[in-house]
Amino acid sequence: MNYTRNIAKSLTAGLSALVLISCTEDDIRPNGIDEGRIETVSECFCSVYNPQGGAGATLRLYDEPVWGEVYVTLGSAAGKAVDLKFVYDAEVLNEYNEANGTSFGAVPQANVDLEADGALLVGPQSVKSDPLRVGITPGGTLAEGETYAVPLRLVSETEGVGVSASQGTYIFWVQVQGKRPSTDKGTGMITVCYVEVNDNNPLNALEWTCKRSGKPLIDIVNIFAANINWIEEERRVGVTLNPNVRHLLDNRAIYLAPLQEAGIRVCLTILGNGDGSGVANLSDEAARAFAHDLRTIVDTYGLDGVDFDDEYSKYEEHKDNLWPGCVQYGPDPYARLLYEVKMAMPDKLVMLYQIGQANYGFKKAVEGVRPGDFIDYVYSDYGALWSTLPHLGLSRRQVGEGSLDMTYGYESSPENLQYNRRMGNGVQMVYNLKPGNGQMTPLNDVAKYIYDDEALWSGIRHEKDW
């Protein structure tokens, strides 16, 4: 089922509270929905809505800006354009602290960036706004280890449209983490690892380190995989999450946060799923909408980016009967999607497995931007070695050649590893990581030839337990 529909069904309201990791559940008391307190002006009222649901949103602030998103929903279409605005309002937090016997401090307004100065617009026939991005920058008086609040109040600037009295405020909670742990192992290269989560637990990536540096052997984990599909009931192309992927995302504190706390970045792979839609046949408008769906998922679940794999879409079978939002497949629509994703989340990773329509190369700029400037990393199959780089503007530091399959444990290719580093590339890709030390040979070769080190396994196995 489509991600957005699932989120919508699970929401009770966008409330100004959540359970904090650094506090007990009793410390934070979500506001209940009191239908009797809803105040309207004329025929229409608006409410704060957040994709995290009634639990609210926790943002972990390291040594780089972090972003969240918030929306507004209307009880019914207003029949005219509705101008709304979020404003920073310390009184929202004062009211919360007084009502709940707490003493949370506010993130200073100087550290808060409201996209478009907080302005939102809802179309005449719409009941939901586009997302408003809320950014928090580190520094100033924010102390490491403390939890702060970003108090926001919704204001209507349109006559005849009021704001719900019980659902007109929102608080983002910000946990100040300090400096993100570094996985840098000193050779200028990173290791990207795909974990097939239908059968495997991503926590196994934690159990491999480098002996000399003590750093995690793996720098980025790609959760394999979410899908791109035609959603018949919505008549559009969207993101779908199978039960295994959804379980990991819904339980990110168990399966994903420990990776990030060790410095490992966690990304979500988008894969074709056997129908006529895919990453290489979206129109510009559909690509933009798909990118915003991905931004919502990334923000909601605290991910570090997305990865794309152009396999299993049945482009050829559907080329003469295209769905709305689809165009003839090729490298140009694929490049456009990657561009739109980067524009929607410039602070997140956009990565690419070099297969499918990407093999033809992205040779043209999109809106004046070279593909190498909106793609962070590209990595090839185990047998693919490039004499020239496939995409316009790509540098060697963004590239990985000669990946390693962990499926059988003992397989490796020292020659490819040595070639990858010798060429000045910046990425080594491995895939099919499983529990245990059965993959010692290839992972030790990665440590040896990529990092001048030795791989260590902790002795801990993480089986699939869901």
Image (cartoon, rainbow, N blue to C red):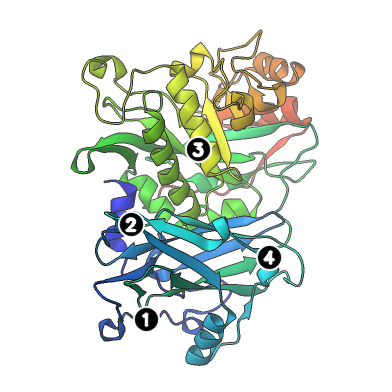
| Res. 441 visible in picture | no
Alpha-carbon neighbours of circle 4 within 10 Å: few (<14), some, or many (≥20)?
some
* Marks 2/3: CA–CA distance: 20 Å
- Amino acid at circle 3: Val
Tell me the number on the disc at residue 165.
1
Which residue type does callout 4 highlight?
Asn
Between 414 and 421, the residue placed more toward the observer is: 421
Could you tell me if the residues under marks 2 and 1 are in contact, i.e. CB atoms within 8 Å?
no
Q: Residue at x 64, y 40 (%)?
A: 219
Which mark, residue 7? 2
Q: Residues within 10 Å of mark 3 (few under 14, many from 20)?
A: many
In the foreground, 135 or 368 = 368
Quadrant in the rendering for residue 450: top right
**Label 4 belongs to which residue?**
111
The residue depicted at 43 percent of the width and 41 percent of the height is 200
**Which residue sits at x=37%, y=40%?**
198
Q: Which residue is mark 3?
A: 341
Q: CA distance from mark 2 to mark 4?
A: 29 Å
**306 versus 111 height, above or below:** above
